[in-house]
Amino acid sequence: MFESSYDVVVVGAGHAGCEAAASAANLGSKTLLVTMNLQNVAQMSCNPAMGGIAKGQIVREIDALGGYSGIVSDRSAIQYKMLNKSKGPAMWSPRVQSDRSLFTLEWRSLLEKTKKLDFYQDTVVDLIIDKDQILGVKTSLGLKIYSKTVILTNGTFLNGLIHIGEKNFGGGRAGEKPSTGLTAAIEKLGFSSGRMKTGTPPRVDGRSLDYSKMEEQPGDSKPLKFSFTNLTQPLTKQISCHITHTNNNVHEVLRTGFDRSPMFNGSIQSSGPRYCPSIEDKINRFSEKSQHQVFVEPEGWNTVEVYVNGFSTSLPDDIQYKALKQVKGFENVKFFRPGYAIEYDYFPPTQLYHSLETKRIQNLFFAGQINGTTGYEEAGAQGIMAGINAHLKSKNKTPFILGREEAYIGVLIDDLILKGTDEPYRMFTSRAEYRTLLRQDNADQRLTAKSYELGLASDERMRSVERKQKKGKDLVLYLEKSSYSLAQANKILRNNNDGEVRQKDKFSKLLSRPNIKRNDLLKFKSIISFLDENAMDDEIFEQAEIEIKYAGYIDKEKRTADKLKRLENIKIPPEFDYERLASLSHEAKEKLTKIQPTTLAQASRISGINPSDISVLLVSMGR
């Protein structure tokens, strides 16, 4: 059937589970992926897209660490867009519209080609524990599977309950049964749990829509890709998305169903994503607005199914249908299925270490929505980190932790562990204090060396990044040392409505001006020659431009990060007794005892811990 024991068992094959299983197996651990349905590996339960604001940075970080999300996203993409190009590069975020079916097929294909990875279809209902240490899992078929480490990535399946108007029924997502029994088993071990809610919009028949009444949203004219590897290629053809809007008629129809809405009649009491509200929540909270955007997103190359982004709802299906028919372009809409809300169990992530291992049970890891997050990207990020750390733990090695100044993944996990979350956590660029350092374009240079040290990145990949870094440094040095001709520079400045210069200066000074772009420098033959002679593509030039234009911001963030690292180096002893420190506030004692930070820097980031509390800790440790 399968091996009698494993180094790592991963429970659940969503985005967290797939990345966890792949990373553990690729590092050399004998790994088993157990899931309720092997046909739905890495299912896109909600929108058919990867990336977006801050999320795109995470996908590139996963790729740089040796994960598969970027490769799968490229291979299944039907449209590519770089968002926020009108803003600074810290905000640029890649996003792809995906072929939902192809996404799952590509993920399964990659997993099946992964050595040391086995699969089994069953439901895990209990854990095998001995003296606060996990030994394996029990399944609904009565099987006992033993393992050195276990990673739980149960998504929305733990006691999942689906709501459509007055109707509700058990389910992990539409058409699939929930996972029961496991929450109770975990709670018996002393873990606290909670309930969260998320929702999804109707899926409709694209043949019934009138796209001529909508605004077309094409992909980028020169699409890029997520993965830094040569395993994927940019798109050569794309499918457009469209935008339409709700109106007052839509809102009036929706209001007629409010008394039957589980959101308003008390059927749902758990927390939902505040930044991604349902359509009924939008018109209730923002009653002054006469319209809301609706994004019409195709589900794939060879299907007419359409995802109605922005119309997430749990209203009765008849109300959903009547309201959507009032939307411009949807007058003759036909439903594939209605939208719904889903409630599910989660475990507050303050019960974990930064490695994602639980504090109560050794060798047990949680990753994904079980930790209170939402989004494929956030789940995949936790998955790859849990997979790496489960492998390291099974080999008695030091855990792999990313700092806030190193990756959005570091910000994500640090926020979860130190602050917890009482609503589905989603990553935003505003959560990262070092976002100029954590750009999407430099994820490979930030993280590939770490992946190489772990054993995930190959020699070839490491050498490729080193060549890229050298070329970037050489180009910046050339621009800082080489001078432009006065006449040609002033011509370019006039064309860009910028002030002329009176004497020669370096190309870097010219490029540092806000109105001057790298394309302007391509009017200088010397620069074209240098780029050609050194085989430097536009990606290298773009990074050089960012380094020069934003040098002040980058240097400031680096200095701030270096200062805070001093606190990271001050370790707090395990089981430190905070109660004996009379000068600490009651709140500080309570939170520090509960979360058990391992460094002073971590302690400083816990909500409710103030600078005076840190001073008390410094003194108590003889600093």
Image (cartoon, helix red, strand yellow):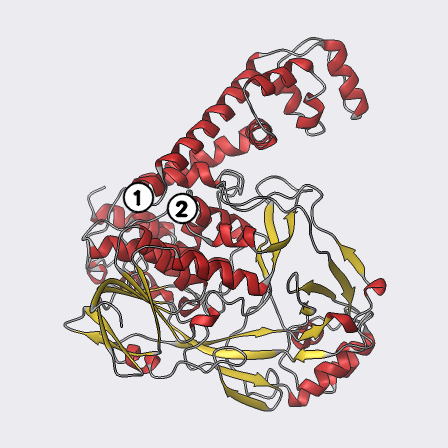
2 vs 288, left or right, is left
Q: Which mark is residue 228?
A: none
How many numbered marks does the figure carry? 2
Q: Amino acid at mark 2?
A: Leu
Question: As displayed, is residue 552 above or below residue 345?
Answer: above
**Of residues 76 and 578, which is closer to you in this image?**
76
Q: Earlier in the sequence, mark 2 or mark 1?
A: 2
Quarter of the figure with residue 202: bottom right
Disc 1 residue crowd, few under 14, some 14–19, many 20+, Cα 10 Å: some
Quadrant of the image containing the N terminus: bottom left
Q: Which mark is residue 455?
A: 1
Reading the image, the residue beneath label 2 is 65
Is residue 565 in sight in this rendering? yes
Question: As displayed, is residue 472 above or below residue 194?
Answer: above
**CA–CA distance in space, label 2 to label 1:** 10 Å
Is residue 418 in sight in this rendering? no
SS assignment at label 2? loop
